[in-house]
Image (cartoon, rainbow, N blue to C red):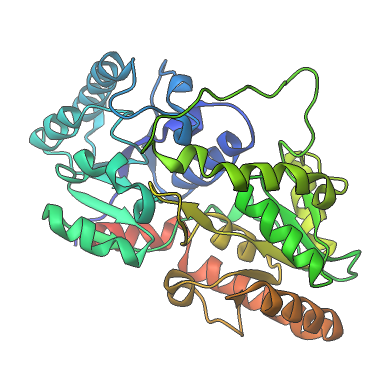
Amino acid sequence: MASLKRVFALAPDCHTVGRYQRVWRRHFYDGLQAALPSVVLPVGVDFGWARPAPQMPPGPSPNREAISERLWDQIQAAHVQGGLDGVISYCFTADVNPALIERTVELGVPWINFFCDSTYAFDRVEALARVTSLNWFPERAAMPSYRAVGRPVLCRPYAVHPAALPEAVCETAEHALGFVGAPTGNRVLRLAGLLLFGSRAEVRGEGWRHTKAAPRLRRPPQPPGADRRVHGRLGERILARALRPLVRGQGRPLADDEVAPFLSRCRVVLGLNEGRDVQGIYRSYLKLRDVEFPGYGCCYLTQDNEDIRHAFEVGREVLTFSHLGEAASLVRRSVRYPEAARAMGQAARRRVLAEHTWAARLVELARAL
């Protein structure tokens, strides 16, 4: 089995701004650089126009062709200068021209593309999936879509950077339940539902409180049959807007150095891992938070799905729920038995550091190639 020692890394989210840019940079670029002898990063490439992904229109982004040519020049130069064992990317079809991948593979450099929203947005990566050397994705339910394009696959969770995960085991619980994330409609509704069951979550994240510097933008009317991944249903949006003040509490963004201290003050950390498909129907699937937060050593509670059950041992390393009454009951039990909650977080951290880091995943990627 040939190993991956020198790769070109490409993740447009690392070239944007905000918390998600920092998270992806820590776990994608920094993680790869810590695990490999040599990583080549794009130079002078601006992907600010490519994100946030849910707001992208269908089809290629305006700068895709120019960006693809610039990347081709850099990949060629890197291969000539020191050889490349592969390209590892996290790209949508809108980000890069599939022809760039074909040219790279013809050069003798395999291309691995990771994509993490395949169960509800496979259409946004399908053209790339048809030409990549290896499609890497975490959702087992997406396997038929990838098998249909006839390319090699690796269905495994995200790879995280251990140095970006300081231990945050809860010793003294200031909050029974904590949540970190943006106020999407489904999250507001789930948090409000938990409140009705007696479980208030202490909320942190960007977007919970609007400021004059960042006014809300009025969305244009959508034609019948529009993609509901972005806009959802009117009734849900109205209800979520009405309920948000009820659940947000002290909701505010967390600085990077505040994340671990906040998590360590929560007996249980909540994950809400749904995404909405083109019909506006929510589906639960593995998200980055489902690996990142257990990696901190939190007692982690998230929505149940097949992917979680294959990444962790449910009941020993993480907790999952199928409905909000069950979630509230698990929170109360964790508060009653703090030692068990701490032990669960520590077990989850051991699993992440053993199986879900770049050092572990690179071996699997090389074997799959």
Position of 157 relative to 184 (above/below): below
Q: In the picture, which quadrant includes the N terminus?
A: bottom left
Nearest the eye: 202 or 299? 202
In this view of the protein, can residue 60 be seen by the observer?
Answer: yes
Instruction: Give 287 or 5, whichever is nearer the viewer.
Output: 287
Residue 82 appears left or right of 178:
left
299 left or right of 130?
A: right
Q: Quadrant of the C terminus?
A: bottom left
Q: Position of residue 69 (x, y in %)?
A: 23, 17
Q: Residue at x 60, y 36 (%)?
A: 22
Eyeballing the image, is 104 above or below 289? above
Residue at figure coordinates x 81%, y 40% from the top left: 252
Which residue is at the front of the view, 349 or 190?
Answer: 190
Q: Quadrant of residue 139?
A: bottom left
Residue 94: x percent and y percent?
31, 29
How many labels were placed on the picture?
0
